[in-house]
Image (cartoon, rainbow, N blue to C red):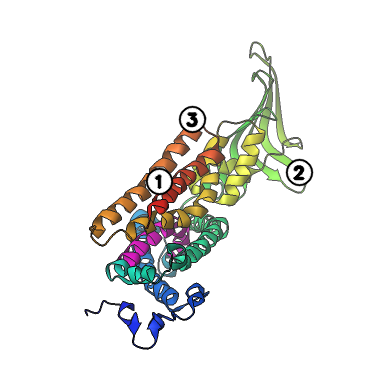
């Protein structure tokens, strides 16, 4: 009898019972339901080895991508040696939650396909072990990966996004110190902020993260119909946290007739403190950033603010926020997609099952992007758009599992 690779050749040992080599004895069928048996360890060992290799290869590609995108700009800012390695080490964790489902899919397809072609799964099924018990270690690992994904999205990825941005800002600051004046060092230009609840519109020509001061400041007061009634312009301004307001220097306070827009008063000032202005500069600097460039904490901050302002911009940030939360179930979705096609009949070309599962994997991301687009346009609630693709693929996977024999 030809011996297949792995543990299948140990299925029969004279006088020891069926599957005694795997830790299963025919005299006690309850051993088949043991919490952890030899086959469980064998399956996990084979799978985790491939998963580690796939993750290492994927992370290597991400290193190349980060170097391609950021290496030149970092070098121009003066980064060298340890700083570059630190930036790479801080940036890579932000990609882990994204590549984990793909790594799970590839490794699981390879491992289960290999075991199936070696007839190891068939032998276990012949011993009376159902697919539920046979693949229990995979589902347990999937649940643990969901916990890992949640931890990455809520803790590691926010830290990675914010810290990598701080590193770039620090490099930009050190570069600007050598070439620019203090007011232009680490400056964000053309900062605009519309506080609809307070009926105020802000604009800075630039805001220096070094001095924490804004330069070329304009603050417009609006009435209920969004007509400008007053405008405060100043050369320089900063938020005074101790006093809870904004300090303005060298400017003018202009008053307008709301109906006609005619200038009716012009009062110059040297120093002016306005306690009623409570807007924080940190929020102003976040408001124009792309959702993909923000951490989970920053997204939550913007959603809370924009929702209270009834701003339509809140939808874009909410789609990203709930999408990150829904991604925590991606490992289980990937496992549910991979298993039915990885254990197809031995007469079926393995490439067929692999291609189908990979096709469903990309269909999942197409549905995710489509649902996000519908939510952005206002056709779906952001939270529903985040969970709908998961529900659809879970239903489809359940149908494939029902067809397994």
Q: Are marks 2 and 3 in contact (CB under 8 Å)?
A: no
Q: Secondary structure at mark 3?
A: loop
SS state under label 2: loop
Give the Cα distance between marks 2 and 3: 38 Å
Disc 2 crowd rating (10 Å Cα; few below 14, some 14-19, many 20+) is some
Read off the magenta span: 87-113
Residue that badge 1 annotates? 365
Query: Which percent across, then down, holds residue 230?
Result: 68, 23
Residue 164's x, y, as percent? Answer: 49, 58
Q: Residue at x 51, y 39 (%)?
A: 385
Q: Reply yes or no: does residue 89 show up in magenta.
A: yes
- Report which residue position mark 3 lands on: 377
Q: Badge 2 is on which residue?
A: 244
User: In this rendering, which labeled residue sits more in front, label 2 or label 3?
Assistant: 3
Q: Nearer the viewer, mark 1 or mark 2?
A: 1
Cα gap from disc 1 to disc 2, whole angstroms: 46 Å
Residue 339 is drawn in which quadrant? bottom left
- Cα separation, mark 3 vs mark 1, equals 18 Å
Give the number of the mark in front: 3 or 1: 1
What kind of secondary structure does the magenta stretch mostly adopt?
A: helix
User: Which residue: 52% across, 61% down?
Assistant: 143
| Residue 315: image location, x then y, percent | 55, 36
Marked residue nearer the N-terminal end (2 or 3): 2
Q: Nearer the viewer, residue 82 or 240?
A: 82
Q: Is the residue 332 above or below the residue 371 in the image? A: below
């Amino acid at each position: 009898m030809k011996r297949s690779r792995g543990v299948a050749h140990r299925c029969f040992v004279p006088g020891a019972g069926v599957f005694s080599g795997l830790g299963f004895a025919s005299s006690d069928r309850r051993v088949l339901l043991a919490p952890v048996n030899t086959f469980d360890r064998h399956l996990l060992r084979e799978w985790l080895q491939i998963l580690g290799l796939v993750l290492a290869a994927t992370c290597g590609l991400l290193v190349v991508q980060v170097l391609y995108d950021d290496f030149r700009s970092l070098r121009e800012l003066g980064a060298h040696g340890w700083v570059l390695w630190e930036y790479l080490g801080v940036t890579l964790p932000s990609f882990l939650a994204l590549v984990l489902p793909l790594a799970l899919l590839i490794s699981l397809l390879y491992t289960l396909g290999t075991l199936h072609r070696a007839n190891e799964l068939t032998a276990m099924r012949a011993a009376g072990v159902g697919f539920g018990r046979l693949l229990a270690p995979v589902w347990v690992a999937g649940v643990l990966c969901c916990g890992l994904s949640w931890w990455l999205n809520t803790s590691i990825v926010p830290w990675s996004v914010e810290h990598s941005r701080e590193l770039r800002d620090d490099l930009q600051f050190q570069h600007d110190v050598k070439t620019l004046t203090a007011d232009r060092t680490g400056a964000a230009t053309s900062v605009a902020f519309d506080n609809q609840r307070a009926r105020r519109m802000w604009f800075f020509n630039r805001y220096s993260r070094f001095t924490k001061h804004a330069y070329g400041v304009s603050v417009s007061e609006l009435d209920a119909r969004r007509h400008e009634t007053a405008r405060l312009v100043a050369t320089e301004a900063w938020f005074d946290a101790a006093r809870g307001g904004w300090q303005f220097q060298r400017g003018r306070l202009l008053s307008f007739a709301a109906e006609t827009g005619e200038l009716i008063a012009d009062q110059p000032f040297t120093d002016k403190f306005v306690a009623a202005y409570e807007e924080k500069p940190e929020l102003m600097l976040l408001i124009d950033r792309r959702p993909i460039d923000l951490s989970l904490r920053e997204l939550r901050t913007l959603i809370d603010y924009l929702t209270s302002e009834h701003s339509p911009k809140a939808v874009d940030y909410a789609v990203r926020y709930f999408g990150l939360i829904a991604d925590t179930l991606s490992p289980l979705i990937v496992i549910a997609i991979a298993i039915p096609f990885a254990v197809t009949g031995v007469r079926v070309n393995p490439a067929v099952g692999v291609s189908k599962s990979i096709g469903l994997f990309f269909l999942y991301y197409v549905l995710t992007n489509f649902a996000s687009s519908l939510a952005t346009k206002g056709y779906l609630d952001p939270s529903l758009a985040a969970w709908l693709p998961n529900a659809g693929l879970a239903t489809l996977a359940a149908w494939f599992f029902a067809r397994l024999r």
